[in-house]
Amino acid sequence: MTFAARRAQFLEDIRDSQTPSARLMAVSKMQPAESIKDALAAGQRLFGENRVQDAEDRWTEYKRTIPDLDLHLIGPLQTNKADKAVALFDMIHSLDREKLAQILSQEMQKQQKKLPCLIQVNTGEETQKAGILPCDLPDFLEFCRKECRLDIQGLMCIPPAQDPPALHFAFLKKLAKAHALSQLSMGMSADYTKALRLGTTYIRIGTALFGQRI
């Protein structure tokens, strides 16, 4: 099946869901150049990357030539890559600590670019996973908004592998509503239908959209 056909299936699932305004993000990490070209030819414009350096290598030229390309950072961001992230990306989904918020704020001022951000929430409180603990979200959100003057639009999560994802999606939605945040980045290939039922605004799809690499 071609990228275009798989994309059409996902878009149909979105249209038929409780959240027809959700956006399909193609997670392009590790994908070869030919797969990216196929995705672009099919009309896909929203892409997610996990690493700044990979995105810089893959997308810098496309960003110059495709005006409506929408590139989001969905992986962890090191503070020493914040300048490149601000220059290249259109949204950051993985804001998760005060130092990063401060550095991003400084870089946005320096580059005169207001970049919308999502806060990554560690809904499962896993020690090995990035993200703000739910109990710390109110203070962190206030710090980001008032001290750093960042444009915080919503929340992102990656549920623990062993848990029913819908529980975490519902929890993230509740947190977002409590703080008047409209954007939710939740749902991947195995659980996106559950995320759509619970109001996600971004589903992040990789191999299920691009197909298995040969």
Image: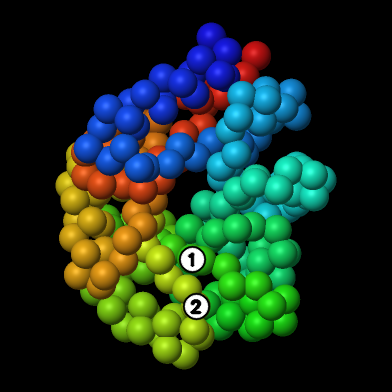
Q: Residue at x 57, y 68 (%)?
A: 115
Q: Amino acid at mark 2?
A: Leu
The CA distance from mark 2 to mark 1 is 7 Å
Q: Is residue 17 above or below residue 169?
A: above
Total label count?
2
Q: Quadrant of residue 198?
A: top left
Work out whether residue 96 or residue 180 is closer to the camera in this orientation and state it: 180
Answer yes or no: is residue 212 visible: no
Q: Judging from the image, what secondary structure is the residue with disc 1 in?
A: strand
| On screen, residue 9 above or below 128 | above
Q: Return the disc, 2 or 1, that comes first in the chain's sequence.
A: 1
| Quadrant for the C terminus in the image | top right
Label 2's element? loop
Is residue 213 rendered to the left or right of residue 62? left
Question: Image quarter for residue 154?
Answer: bottom left
The answer to whether residue 86 is left or right of residue 25 is: right
Judging by the rendered image, the residue that carries numbered circle 1 is 117
Label 1: how many Cα within 10 Å (few below 14, some 14–19, many 20+): many
Circle number at residue 6: none
Q: Residue at x 51, y 15 (%)?
A: 5
Q: In the image, 140: left or right of 69? A: left
Task: Find out whether the residues at labels 2 and 1 contact each other: C-beta distance under 8 Å.
Answer: yes
For the view shown, which residue lies furthest in the bottom direction? Answer: 147
Rendering coords of residue 91 (x, y %)? 55, 59
Relative image position of residue 130 (x, y in whole percent):
43, 61
> Looking at the rendering, which quadrant does residue 181 occupy?
bottom left
Q: Residue at the location (74% across, 23% down)?
A: 34
Q: Is residue 47 visible?
A: yes
The image's mark for residue 150 is 2
Image coordinates of residue 124 in percent, x first then y, are: 27, 55
Residue density around tag 2, few if under 14, some if 14–19, many if 20 or more, within 10 Å: many
Name the residue: 25% across, 47% down: 199
